[in-house]
Each structure stands twice: as C-alpha cells, then as structure tokens.
Amino acid sequence: MDFKHGMGVFTEKMPDLARKYNAFSEACFKEGKLSKKEKQLIALGISIFSQDEYCIIYHTKGCLDQGCSEKEILEAIGVCAAFGGGAAMSQSVTLVQEAITDLSQENDKLH
C-alpha cells in the first residue's frame, strides 16, 4: 500500500514520466516467450537479491496472482539464495513467507 500511495503522489507530480515508466514496466511483464508467471518469479528473485522489501512483497503478490504455488516460489528462492547467500535467504524466510501468509489470508477473505 505504501508503494501504491507513493506512485500515486509521484504520478500527480510527474505524470509524463510515471506514464512512460508504467508503460515500460507493463511491456516488460507482458506475456511473451516467457509467461507472466515466469517473469514474476524472475522479478521476485531479483527483488530478493537486491533486498528491495517493497518489490519483494509486490512480486510475491505477482507470483501468487499468476498462479504460482508456494513450492514454486520456494524453489525460486532456493535459486536466488544460491547467488545471494544468507542475505537472500534471510529475506526469503522472513519477508516472503510473511507476504505469502498475509496475501493468502487476504485472498481467502475476498472469496
């Protein structure tokens, strides 16, 4: 929610730049040779490796929205940890797990 709010404020102040950034991002995550699901898993791994908490939560949600199972997310985390070591693993076993739990509970309330 903080990210959405921040993007809203940024969009008000810099509409042309925000529109172009959003269009670029949408193009990057569009279905292509790689599925949207695969792209979200890649983005999650990069987010974890770079330790960007907002993107970790955002792309965990993206993975779930694209139908990733918890096992698929955990497998992607394992690959990320092979490169990012303990720092990547600490983000994964805390923030990603918490996001999966919170987002799953939120989704259950909606259905």
Image: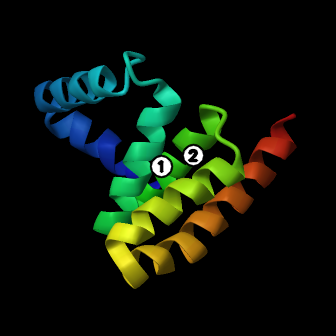
Other-residue count near label 2 (Cα within 10 Å), few / some / many at <14 / 14–19 / ≥20: many
Give the side of residue 47 with respect to residue 16, left or right. right
The quadrant of the picture occupied by the C terminus is: top right
* Residue depicted at x 82% and y 37%: 110
Count of residue discs: 2
Q: CA distance from mark 1 to mark 2?
A: 5 Å
* Residue depicted at x 47% and y 49%: 58
30 w.r.t. 52: above or below: above
Q: Position of residue 48 (x, y in %)?
A: 40, 64
Amino acid at circle 2: Lys
Q: Position of residue 97 (x, y in %)?
A: 64, 67
Residue 93 appears in view: yes
Q: Are marks 1 and 2 in contact (CB under 8 Å)?
A: yes
Amino acid at circle 1: Tyr
Task: Name the one closer to the observer, 64 or 72.
Answer: 72
* Residue depicted at x 62% and y 61%: 99
Q: What numbered label is drawn on residue 61?
A: 2
107 w.r.t. 87: above or below: above
SS at mark 1? helix
* Residue depicted at x 62% and y 35%: 65
Residue under numbered circle 1? 58
Other-residue count near label 1 (Cα within 10 Å), few / some / many at <14 / 14–19 / ≥20: some
